[in-house]
Amino acid sequence: MKTYPLPIYVQRFFTQRLATQLHASPNTIASYRDTFRLLLKYATDQLGREPTDLQVADIDSDLVGSFLSFIETTRGNGARSRNTRLSAIRSFFKYVAVNEPQLLHHCQRVLAMPSKRHEKRTIDYLTRTEIEALIAAPEPSTWSGRRDRTLLLLAVQTGLRVSELINLTCSDVVLGTGAHVRCIGKGRKERATPLRRDCAKLLRVWLAERAGADGEPLFVSNRGGRLSRDAVERIVRTHVGEASRHCSTLRGKRVTPHVLRHTAAMQLLQNGVDRTVIALWLGHESVETTQMYIHADIQLKEKAMAKTKPVTASAGRYHPADELLAFLEAL
């Protein structure tokens, strides 16, 4: 009887499927790796066998279900984290199902497990006044201040992800007529984002001061190395704190690099740009992803409300005529 050792398929999934076939980003691979670390440790505790001794059949829908409950109840993860873990597990079993048809029924039971509904919060973004206060916060008389101001303006204007910002090289910035910045986004997709004149002007000055070769990072640390995600988050947090001294609405407001990306999208939406163009601008896989900005735009809703007319009819209350309808209305 043929056996299906789990270690073989896990290794192939990461080396062949994710790295070679899909060219998954380092962030995606790291997220999937962390999921399988947790899953394999949980399976070892439950089954009493080391990960190298497990079979694919040992990771069934019952085990996956109890694992998902474990990370919520014991580890205190929210529904979003649970769904992220489940997504990684599903991806693995899709790979197994394609390569081992004999395990199709086993895989389908795991793939049929639903994601958990969760509360969708309205996205955070900065207003025009808050943007101006943040951009003005870095000290222009220092090298780090000039770097930070350029980085913040570029982030707010282009909506680049943190990973895209820190991986920019000096040659990715194209100035002159049709100024733009090139980047590699999710799914290894390359895109070009236009630059406003103020942003292009600041980048030109920074590039002259940076004096880096074409393949060198656009933004570097004080030691000359590429900025990390944590460094960018620290830069944003530091200057938001400084800007809040002059802009009261920033006080207590949680601002992250991703909030700057949301801000870029909201600026486009509020200036009448179609959401299809916004999706292309941000590098979204689907136009539906951009729908969240429409939900968050209070100004758009206020304009819609201004076009409505007040109701002149007297207020009343609906009374169902049937007992069954009354029961349903009371639910």
Image (cartoon, rainbow, N blue to C red):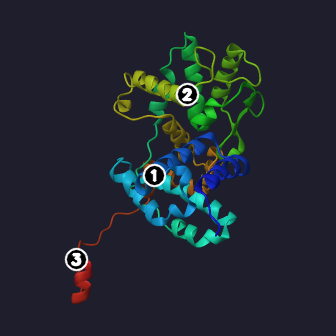
* Residue on which the image places disc 3: 330
Mark 2 or mark 3: name the one nearer the start of the chain.
2
* Residue on which the image places disc 1: 44
Relative vertical location of residue 192 with respect to residue 220 in this rendering, above or below = below
Mark 3 or mark 1: name the one nearer the start of the chain.
1
Screen quadrant of the N terminus: bottom right
- Between the residue at mark 2 and the residue at mark 1, the CA separation in whole angstroms equals 46 Å
Q: Nearer the viewer, residue 155 or 271?
A: 155
* Residue type, mark 3 in image: Ala
- Between the residue at mark 3 and the residue at mark 1, the CA separation in whole angstroms equals 49 Å
* Residue type, mark 1 in image: Thr
Q: Nearer the viewer, residue 149 or 212?
A: 212
Residue sitting at x 41%, y 62%: 308
- 175 sits left or right of 73 in the view: right
Residue 234 is labelled as: none
Residue 152 is labelled as: 2
Residue sitting at x 46%, y 60%: 64
Label 2: state its secondary structure: helix
Q: Nearer the viewer, mark 2 or mark 1?
A: 1
Task: Give x and y (percent) for residue 34.
Answer: 51, 44
Label 3: state its secondary structure: helix
Residue sitting at x 68%, y 16%: 210
Mark 2 or mark 1: name the one nearer the start of the chain.
1
Label 1: state its secondary structure: helix
Task: Give x and y (percent) for residue 279.
Answer: 62, 50
Crowding around mark 2 (Cα neighbors within 10 Å: few <14, some 14 to 19, many 20+) is many
Screen quadrant of the C terminus: bottom left
Please tell me in which quadrant of the rendered image residue 152 appears. Answer: top right
- 16 sits left or right of 72 in the view: right
Task: Give x and y (percent) for residue 90.
Answer: 55, 60
* Residue type, mark 2 in image: Leu
